[in-house]
């Protein structure tokens, strides 16, 4: 069995001189995107990511006066993956996102949809927790979304040095998934070993997918993903949006880009 085929528009690449500039620019892009969507239909949906870059973007957004242009009461917030740890654990993506941004803006708690914690309603059963999140997404999907998950307006992702994205690792069972939208992940090569993750089919439901990463350690994976590697080998290569796939890189992460992706510095 092979992994799901790569789909979607040709990726766009923007390179920033430093990680700090990338985080600030990504925060500004997110404000613009959410405000535009809300102006069009009144509400927006965003999938958050963890990691150094993902949380840095949220901190930049928190400190930006432009954050108040967003009607936070009408933003649906989801996560692309989560470490299956107790509620409030400092390594949970939810905990970090709340500290970086969500505790400081007037979000509607009913519109914030974290993945279950290991001491939550599913106890230590990560597969049941994943199925529960899949059911939540299915209930939130509208007929016009044409699928089992919402057509998220922006889905943000990071990238690992070996090419993983969300908690989909190279050659892992999750990367071969073609039907389920959320899976429990066991035996991750990067601790903690147990996680919950959206699958590539769920990620590809998003209108826009943004992949952001920095540093020399990511350069080879970035180059392979944008150079035509398959999703089984480099899962980030399979993360594409329906209308837009945007890679946000610093100069170091972009150092090995194929010639087809050598944009000027932003």
Image (tube, rainbow, N blue to C red):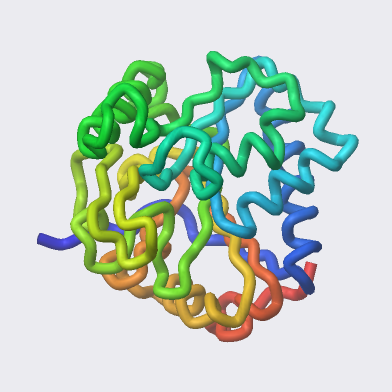
Rendered residue at 28%/38% (across/down): 181
Where on the picture, by quarter, is residue 141? top left
Q: Quadrant of the N terminus?
A: bottom left
The quadrant the C terminus occupies is bottom right
Vertical arrangement, residue 191 with respect to residue 30, above or below: below
For residue 253, say whether it is visible. Answer: yes
Residue sitting farthest toward the right: 65
Q: Nearer the viewer, residue 13 or 200?
A: 200
Q: At 55% from the left edge and 18% from the top edge, which residue is drawn?
A: 111
- In terms of depth relative to the viewer, which is nearer, 74 or 4? 74
User: Which is more toward the observer, 242 or 233?
Assistant: 233
88 displayed left or right of 5 = right
Q: Is residue 39 shown to the viewer in this render?
A: no
Does residue 125 appear to the left or right of 14 in the view shown?
left
Q: Quadrant of residue 134?
A: top left
Q: Position of residue 194 (x, y in %)?
A: 30, 50
From the top left corner, tell me how far across and down residue 58 is, in percent. 70, 44
* 33 lies left or right of 87: right
Residue 183, percent across and down? 26, 42
Q: Residue at x 86, y 41 (%)?
A: 64
Q: Is 141 drawn above or below residue 30 in the view shown?
A: above
Q: Is residue 93 above or below residue 231?
A: above
Q: Residue at x 75, y 46 (%)?
A: 59
When asked about the image quadrant of residue 32, the answer is: top right
- Indicate the position of residue 195 as horizontal and vertical percent values: 33, 48
């Amino acid at each position: 069995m092979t992994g799901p085929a790569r789909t979607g528009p040709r990726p766009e690449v923007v390179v920033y001189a430093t990680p700090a500039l990338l985080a600030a620019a990504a925060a500004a892009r997110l404000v613009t995107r959410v405000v535009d969507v809300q102006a069009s239909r009144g509400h927006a949906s965003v999938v958050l990511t963890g990691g150094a870059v993902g949380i840095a973007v949220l901190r930049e957004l928190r400190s930006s006066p432009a954050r108040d242009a967003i009607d936070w009461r009408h933003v649906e917030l989801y996560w692309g993956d989560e470490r299956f740890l107790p509620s409030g654990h400092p390594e949970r993506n939810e905990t970090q996102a709340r500290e970086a941004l969500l505790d400081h803006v007037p979000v509607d708690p009913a519109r914030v949809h974290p993945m279950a914690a290991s001491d939550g309603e599913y106890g230590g059963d990560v597969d049941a927790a994943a199925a529960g999140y899949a059911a939540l997404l299915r209930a939130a999907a509208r007929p016009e979304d044409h699928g089992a998950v919402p057509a998220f307006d922006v889905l943000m992702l990071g990238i690992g040095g070996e090419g993983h994205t969300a908690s989909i690792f190279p050659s892992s069972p999750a990367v071969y998934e073609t039907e389920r939208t959320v899976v429990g992940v066991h035996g991750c090569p990067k601790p903690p070993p147990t996680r919950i993750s959206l699958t590539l089919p769920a990620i590809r439901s998003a209108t826009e997918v943004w992949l952001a990463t920095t540093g020399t350690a990511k350069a080879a994976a970035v180059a392979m993903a944008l150079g035509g590697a398959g999703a089984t080998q480099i899962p980030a290569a399979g993360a594409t949006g329906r209308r837009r796939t945007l890679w946000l890189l610093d100069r170091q992460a972009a150092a090995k880009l194929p010639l087809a992706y050598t944009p000027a510095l932003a």
